[in-house]
Image (cartoon, grey):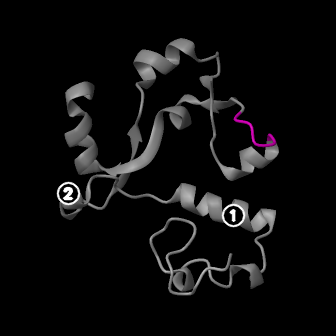
Amino acid sequence: MKIGRNEKCWCGSGKKFKHCHYGREKEQPFSKGEAIGESKKIGARKCCYVPEELKGECDKKIINAHTISKSGSLKEIADTTNHVLGLKIDLANLFKHKGKLVPERMGINQASTFTGFCAKHDKELFSCIED
């Protein structure tokens, strides 16, 4: 069955086929290295993940927000070099482990933080827990 250019795309994006997947079969596929590079760029982006209506209040300084307490939790289960087992979910590791998520050693600083909030919103959201 052929999809018309002006019909909704088969992928469910809601866009017209001509603005979405039309002509993709003629494009050169990404190499494994290119795909991993793009994945690393996406994973390294820093932005505040608050709802759109709060983005105007952001102070633009993205910080390493803590997802879990280092002193209260991670240090208790860390080895003598302050490493724990954690999941590094990125394309490179998925290729490396043939699509399986395999726990790897990581420092407690890396295991406990992510770059998902500006300083203002991190404080507003988590002060009730941290303070």
Residue 89 occupies quadrant:
top right
In this rendering, the answer to whether 4 lies above or below 43 is: below
Mark 2 residue type: Leu
Which secondary structure lies at badge 1?
A: helix
The residue beneath circle 1 is 37
The percent coordinates of residue 130 (x first, y second) are: 27, 27
Crowding at dot 2, Cα within 10 Å, few <14 / some 14-19 / many 20+, comes out as few
Q: Which mark is residue 53?
A: none
* Quadrant including the N terminus: bottom right
Secondary element at image label 2:
helix
8 vs 121: above or below: below
Q: Residue 131: tell me if it is visible.
A: no
User: At 78% from the left edge and 73% from the top edge, which residue is drawn?
Assistant: 29
Circle nearer the N terminus (2, 1):
1
Q: What is the chief secondary structure element of the magenta stretch?
A: loop
Answer yes or no: is residue 76 visible.
yes
Q: Which residues are magenta?
A: 97-101
Residue linked to disc 2 = 54
Which is nearer the eye, 44 or 71? 44
- Identify the residue at horizontal 46%, vertical 38% (top origin): 113
Residue at (80%, 40%) from the top-left corner? 97
**How far from the left and from the top, in percent, is residue 15?**
46, 76
User: Outermost residue, top direction?
Assistant: 76
Q: Which amino acid does the dot numbered 1 rest on?
A: Gly
- Give the quadrant of residue 54: bottom left
Q: Residue at x 19, y 60 (%)?
A: 53
Magenta stretch containing residue 45, yes or no?
no
- x and y percent of residue 131 in the render? 22, 26
Horizontally, residue 128 falls left or right of residue 11, namely left
Q: Are marks 2 and 1 in contact (CB under 8 Å)?
A: no
Q: Position of residue 60 (x, y in %)?
A: 30, 62
Number of callouts in the render? 2
